[in-house]
Amino acid sequence: MDIRILTPDDAAEWWRLRQESLARDPEAFGASIEDEHTLSVEEVRRRIAASRDEFFIVGAFDHGQLAGMAGFYREKSAKGRHKGGVWGVYVTPAHRGQGLARKIFEALLAHAAAIPGVEQILISVATTQAAAAKLYRSLGFETYGREPRALKVGGRYIDEELMQLRFDRSASGDS
């Protein structure tokens, strides 16, 4: 398994897996296939080419095929640049239960922690995704709130657990 930050050349493969994730697990994502149907592979390529201090996607490749992914973005506003967010976490059913999501997250967090000025990472997880929430807690994320009825999927409301991970910057003096 090759775990690395995606490059623009990976855009088509990411787009394939993104479509699979939205179709297979609609309750796990704030986005839907309908929301993203106009997004082109070329637009994905441009986003992936952006500064890795602002946006990146970690992917796990099994024999050249993307088997799992997680994205990171940094808040753009001057008052919010100390925060980053995680989005689009997905591992194919055939690769679940093997520790792959943990490895992807470890790579994502290592890269995010190295970005100057990023002090905390936020993630929201649908309450229907117990395994994901358990993984995030094991990586040090803590719950700071819950958004009732955050998602509406097929007439059913789903709450989201809001979680954060703070980086200890006191030793380096970075604040």
Image: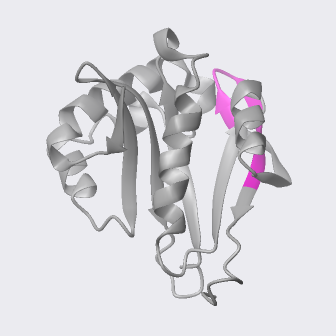
> What segment is highlighted magenta in the picture?
151-163
For residue 62, which quarter of the picture? top left
Magenta portion: prevailing SS class: strand
Task: Please check the rendered image and state whether residue 9 is part of the magenta-colored stretch, yes or no.
Answer: no
On the image, the x and y values in percent for residue 163 come to 75, 53
**What residue is shown at x 59% (from left), y 78% (from top)?**
82
Where, quadrant-wise, is the N terminus in this rendering? top left
In the rendered view, tell whether residue 42 sits above or below residue 61.
Answer: below
In the rendered view, tell whether residue 142 sits above or below residue 102.
Answer: below
In the rendered view, tell whether residue 152 sits above or below residue 85.
Answer: above
On the image, the x and y values in percent for residue 36 come to 36, 38
Q: How is the image coloured?
A: one colour
The tally of labels here is: 0
In the rendered view, tell whether residue 116 sits above or below residue 72.
Answer: below
**What residue is shown at x 57% (from left), y 40% (from top)?**
30
87 left or right of 9 in image: right
On the image, the x and y values in percent for residue 9 come to 14, 42
**What residue is shown at x 77% (from left), y 33% (from top)?**
134
On the image, the x and y values in percent for residue 96 come to 56, 16
96 left or right of 134 in image: left
100 left or right of 129 in image: left
Where, quadrant-wise, is the C terminus in this rendering? bottom right
For residue 148, which quarter of the picture? top right
Residue 128 visible from this viewpoint: no
Residue farthest along the top direction in this orientation: 94
For residue 132, which quarter of the picture? top right
Residue 166 visible from this viewpoint: yes
Residue farthest along the front direction in this orientation: 171
66 left or right of 26 in image: left
